[in-house]
Amino acid sequence: MIARRFLSFHQRVFTSSLRVMSSIPPPECLFKDINIPNRQLFGPGPSTMPQVIGSTQAQPLLGHLHPEFVEIMSQVRLGLQYVFKTRNAYTLAVSGTGHAGMEAAILNLAERGETLLVAKAGIWGQRAADLGRRLGLKVEVVEVGDGQIVPLSAIEEAATRVKPAVIFVCHGESSTGIAQPLEGLSKIAHDNGGLLLVDTVASLGGAPFDMDALGVDCVYSATQKVLNAPPGLAPISFSDRAIQKIKKRKERVASFYFDALELGNYWGCDGEMRRYHHTAPISTVYALREALAIIAKKGIDTLIQQHLDTATGLYSQLGEAGLSMFVERKEDRLPCLHTVKVPEGVDWKGVQTALFQQGIEFAGGLGATTGKIFRIGTFGQNSEPEKAKEVVNKFIQVVKEQSKL
Amino acid sequence: MIARRFLSFHQRVFTSSLRVMSSIPPPECLFKDINIPNRQLFGPGPSTMPQVIGSTQAQPLLGHLHPEFVEIMSQVRLGLQYVFKTRNAYTLAVSGTGHAGMEAAILNLAERGETLLVAKAGIWGQRAADLGRRLGLKVEVVEVGDGQIVPLSAIEEAATRVKPAVIFVCHGESSTGIAQPLEGLSKIAHDNGGLLLVDTVASLGGAPFDMDALGVDCVYSATQKVLNAPPGLAPISFSDRAIQKIKKRKERVASFYFDALELGNYWGCDGEMRRYHHTAPISTVYALREALAIIAKKGIDTLIQQHLDTATGLYSQLGEAGLSMFVERKEDRLPCLHTVKVPEGVDWKGVQTALFQQGIEFAGGLGATTGKIFRIGTFGQNSEPEKAKEVVNKFIQVVKEQSKL
């Protein structure tokens, strides 16, 4: 006891924590090397990351308000405006993966008690509806069968009836492989006093999209699909109309992390007087900058055209092999994520496993489409025609082998 | 018109978007190389990242449910249990930076209308209180002056009075440099029917902490401080008591992204039947795994002791140079983030700028302490005695030079 009185406060605490510590030894698995095999990612994402994007993450960290990092953030904003095709000031990346973009969008655009109208063509519409209910919104759903697009007329009818604060549409529904047409939707939203929100997680850069021409009020996406960057950021853009609505909110946004005006200030959307908001994921921002640089050099429309051309080739390739696309009408198909019917008698899991053993990821369905379809992602550099053709050939071969079993 | 009818749907959309595109050219800045200078980060974080952690991010992406990635997640969970000193099953990393950890914790632990008691000793208590109000909680604040710790008696008095669902305490208040004592707090929380939530963003691994021995119900942290990993993940752990409360909630958590039970399932906290929840930031998870491996090899208590020893040396070093610590009592100081009074007549910004030009980041104050203090972070590998001593010497020299001006 006497000896203890001579120990400093820190030492005392430390001594007691040492005693407790001994019951939790350091995990043995952390003494071994990390195991990361090289794999070609042709599923619904993440997609294969080019080495030049990965290696930028090995560079030293900068502080989140250092001038060079602020400059990189500005470059990311310009790059995102370029790929979204928008001049919106409030264009930035939320520090979370794609779903964080959905949360940030709905949290900011709608207030408790307001109505969210969801055009549901698969799991992402379902997710948005579920989130709306969690957030205390009234949720109205316009639903279609899997593999269908939601008709404009159905959205218009519902909007006229419920006067939604926000209409949610998923551009590229990755659970079914449809590309939802977006023309005419902003007029419906605006005519009924609301805003148009579009999820482009699985479509941005891989299907035609023009935020400003379409009159979209908020769009979000992810980095690990066509952009070929690592997951961890959700690009997002708000129209002036959306920002006006947010500025007039009665209640504050039920999040600080996702507050669009706070985020916008940190990202320099309202001028150069940036306040500290949170510590951005520095390495991931570097990677997104490099991914956007690749697209700027290639040209966003060249990239989209590459996806369209590769999709056309892939439809023929699969058709010649006797395989059928899940989405019947060609014009309804998402050009960067292809859904193929599992032929009768074929074990889809067996196909997936066989390809996985060859170092290639292909996916099965998601949600209601599980067991019914294969999903083939040709995102970004995986849409290079020769590469896609070769990998799809391997897929066809494995399906054929499995059919014989 | 006739020609247009022969164009496919995709081509038509594409043609129209091409026309619009031409008004937004690719940003010129993305044609230049990215500019990332090498800098020693001795501010409040992010801290300098060792090359071995950075380079793991250059490795190829895995899918978010690939067996090797699931194995890495398991290793991260074990590593986090080790550094938090807990056997809690629900120990994982939220896919966002430190503040996302705060949001996840409060969102899950409290329901609208319940009371959050905040022990406020600086900006992080203020942030938690503000967030509580955004989330529709009743917020009670126990406040002390900058540089003070919150007395246990004041927390006990308030808790007995307001019966909080959650007591929030910031262990390492990085805006003032105090280390809040945690002993006895869980008893106060539990005796009054509530839970104890501790923010260890700036303290984990740099100050004694033992989750289970202290009876903490929820703790969160960040990766870019003592762990020396890139920002982008918020380690978090929930006690069984916390999980029981969450399972009995009347309303669902007002977030899907931050829902503890959903996250816990994805991270394998409730068994190996993992559902897809979101796409984890793959590269950042690799980096966190490597950061935890470094700590496992060194030993968490050796690491904490290194911070304590370096802090003691630094107090002498600064004292000999005639500089005063902002936090008066040694036992109240955070051993990994040191706050030093700006001497009269010294331009703190000038000091910061001069060091920055030498490639070293030191910070000024934050919030109410702006202009009053310097903040020196010796996080993780920056707490190696020789390294810290050398950098602090440079700081002292610059302060002396500035004093003469």
Image (tube, coloured by chain):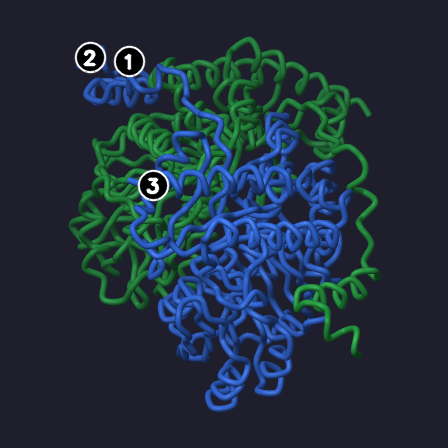
Chain colours: A blue, B green
Image point (30%, 26%), residue name: B82
Q: Which mark is drawn over residue A6? A: 1
Name the residue beneath numbered marker 3.
Answer: A402
Subunit that carries the residue with mark 3 = A
Q: Locate the N terminus of chain A by quadrant.
A: top left
Helix, strand or loop at mark 3: helix
Instruction: Say left or right for B362 vs A403.
Output: right
Q: CA distance from mark 3 to mark 1?
A: 75 Å
Instruction: Say left or right for A92 vs B221.
Output: right
Name the residue beneath numbered marker 2.
Answer: A2
Task: Identify which amino acid the numbered label 1 is placed on.
Answer: Phe
| Neighbour tally class for label 3: few under 14, some 14-19, many 20 plus, Cα within 10 Å | some
Q: Locate the C terminus of chain A by quadrant.
A: top left
Percent x, y of residue B218:
29, 44
Percent x, y of residue A154:
49, 84
Q: Which mark is drawn over residue B255? A: none
Q: CA distance from mark 2 to mark 3?
A: 77 Å
Badge 2 and badge 3 in a common chain = yes
Question: Contact (CB < 8 A) between labels 3 and 1?
Answer: no
Percent x, y of residue A219:
60, 63
Task: Identify which amino acid the numbered label 3 is placed on.
Answer: Gln
Quick one: label 3 or label 1, which is nearer the N terminus?
1
Farthest bottom residue in view: A161
Question: Contact (CB < 8 A) between labels 1 and 2?
Answer: yes
Image point (26%, 17%), residue name: A15
Helix, strand or loop at mark 1: helix
What is the quadrant of residue A75 in the picture? top right
Mark 2 against mark 3, which lies toward the viewer?
A: 3
Mark 3 against mark 1, which lies toward the viewer?
A: 3
Badge 3 and badge 1 in a common chain = yes
